[in-house]
Image: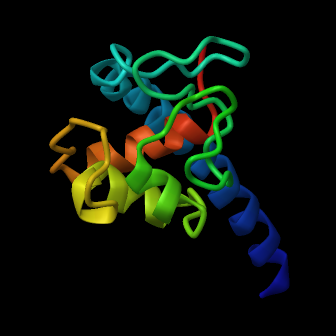
Amino acid sequence: MLKFVAPLAAALVLAAAPAQAQDAAAGKRAFLKCVACHSIAKGAPNKIGPNLFGVVGRKAGTAPGFRYSAAMKAKGAAIVWNPATLDNWLARPSAVIPGTSMAFGGVPNAAERAAIIAYLKKPMP
């Protein structure tokens, strides 16, 4: 039995890697709706919205040099951007932080949100 477990585990890991890359590629395409306001490249300037490079794992409202809304300043410090909080934010930003200055209705499609989050975790050139 054990001789089958290791190859099976290795196969599952290898199968997951292309799926994650595919999700990130789909996320890159989905992120196109965000590029008018957000950059994702390391060291790129903030736009209307903050640069999102390294956003996963970061406290909300902490992108260097960006002027956040009063609502984000008040509530943002309690939020860490992880897949769950990003999913909620992408679904409907104003529901997560009422009064946010982010004028975006949200991404209703859960698979599209997951793809964007995969891309935010590991931006592709």
Residue 7 visible to an observer of this rendering: yes
**Foreground residue, 90 or 111?**
90
Of the pair 102 and 125, the residue shown nearer to us: 102
Q: In which quarter of the image is the C terminus?
A: top right
- Where residue 60 appears, x then y in whole percent? 56, 53
The residue sitting at 49% across, 62% down in the picture is: 74
Q: Quadrant of the N terminus?
A: bottom right
Q: In which quarter of the image is residue 122?
A: top right
Quarter of the view holding residue 104: top left
Left or right: 120 as drawn, with respect to 103: right
Asked if residue 56 is positioned above or below residue 52 in the image, the reply reads below
Numbered marks: total: 0
Counting from the top left corner in percent of width and height, residue 58 is at 67, 51
Query: On the picture, is 103 further left or further right than 70?
Result: left
- Residue drawn at (30%, 40%), measured in percent from left and top? 101
- Residue 102 at what x, y percent from top left? 30, 38
In the picture, measured across the screen, residue 58 lies left or right of residue 95, that is right
Q: Which residue is drawn at 34% across and 60% down?
A: 97
Residue sitting at x 58%, y 51%? 16
As displayed, is residue 30 above or below residue 32?
below
Q: Where is residue 4 in the image (x, y as percent from the top left)?
A: 75, 75
